[in-house]
């Protein structure tokens, strides 16, 4: 028999720590949730950008496809009225100076009611419109249309 004096005793050794790979199932679920959240956010951003491009193209194409300058003014006026309904359902029934004041909005320059934007009142009914007048009102109408449609440019 072995005597207690000759017995070699050693301290208890802990096993090696588990490796970091493969991760626990909870980490896999967290990674999947994060991946899905990023994919959904990207999808919303792409959809928003596509919608904004379509809104801009709608205005530009409607004005560009107008056969005459007066038809272009009429197309601008129609699109502005359609966009105005997004802010006020009764805005499309405004006429005259009330309509132009609505288009001015918060702009202190009043480009519609006392500037080049007055062409929108009767420009769609005129036979001839000066190209200079159309060139002045086009960027004003486009900017206001994009504001009403809430497109960031």
Image (cartoon, rainbow, N blue to C red):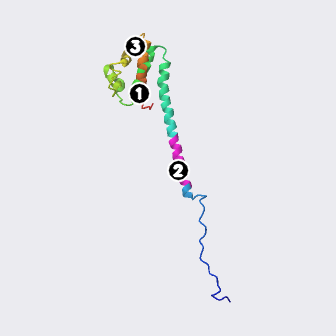
Query: Looking at the picture, does residue 109 appear above or below residue 5?
Result: above
Task: Give residue 100's mark.
Answer: none
The residue most toward the top is 127
Query: Looking at the picture, does residue 130 appear above or below residue 44?
Result: above
Q: Mark 3 points at which residue?
A: 125
Residue located at (60% from left, 61% from top): 19
Q: How crowded is mark 2: few (under 14 residues within 10 Å), some or many (20 or more)?
A: few
Residue located at (42% from left, 11% from top): 130
User: Real-space Cα distance between discs 3 and 1?
Assistant: 21 Å
**Mark count:** 3
User: Do residues under tags 3 and 1 come within 8 Å of each other at their CB atoms?
Assistant: no
Query: Looking at the picture, does residue 4 appear above or below residue 22?
Result: below
The residue most toward the front is 5
- Give the side of residue 26 with respect to residue 83, left or right: right
Residue located at (48% from left, 35% from top): 48
User: Do residues under tags 3 and 2 come within 8 Å of each other at their CB atoms?
Assistant: no
User: Real-space Cα distance between discs 2 and 1?
Assistant: 38 Å
Task: Give residue 33's mark.
Answer: 2
The foreground one among 140 and 69 is 140
Q: Is residue 132 magenta?
A: no
Task: Give residue 83's mark.
Answer: 1
The chief SS type of the magenta part is helix
SS at badge 3: helix
User: Do residues under tags 2 and 1 come within 8 Å of each other at their CB atoms?
Assistant: no
Please provide the residue range marked out in magenta. Answer: 28-42
Q: Which of marks 3 and 2 is in front?
A: 2
SS at badge 1: helix
Q: Quadrant of the C terminus?
A: top left
Query: Dividing the picture into quarters, in which one does residue 110 lie?
Result: top left
């Amino acid at each position: 028999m072995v005597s207690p004096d000759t017995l070699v005793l050693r301290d208890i050794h802990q096993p090696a720590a588990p490796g970091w790979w493969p991760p626990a199932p909870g980490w896999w679920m967290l990674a999947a949730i994060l991946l899905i959240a990023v994919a959904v956010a990207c999808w919303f951003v792409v959809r928003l950008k596509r919608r904004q491009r379509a809104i801009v193209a709608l205005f530009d194409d409607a004005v560009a496809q107008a056969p005459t300058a007066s038809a272009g003014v009429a197309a601008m006026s129609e699109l502005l009225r359609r966009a105005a309904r997004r802010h006020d359902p009764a805005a499309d029934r405004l006429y005259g100076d009330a309509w132009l004041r609505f288009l001015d909005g918060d702009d202190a320059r009043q480009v519609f009611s006392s500037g080049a934007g007055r062409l929108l009142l009767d420009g769609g009914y005129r036979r001839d419109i000066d190209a200079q007048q159309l060139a002045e009102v086009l960027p004003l109408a486009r900017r206001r249309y994009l504001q009403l449609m809430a497109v960031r440019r």
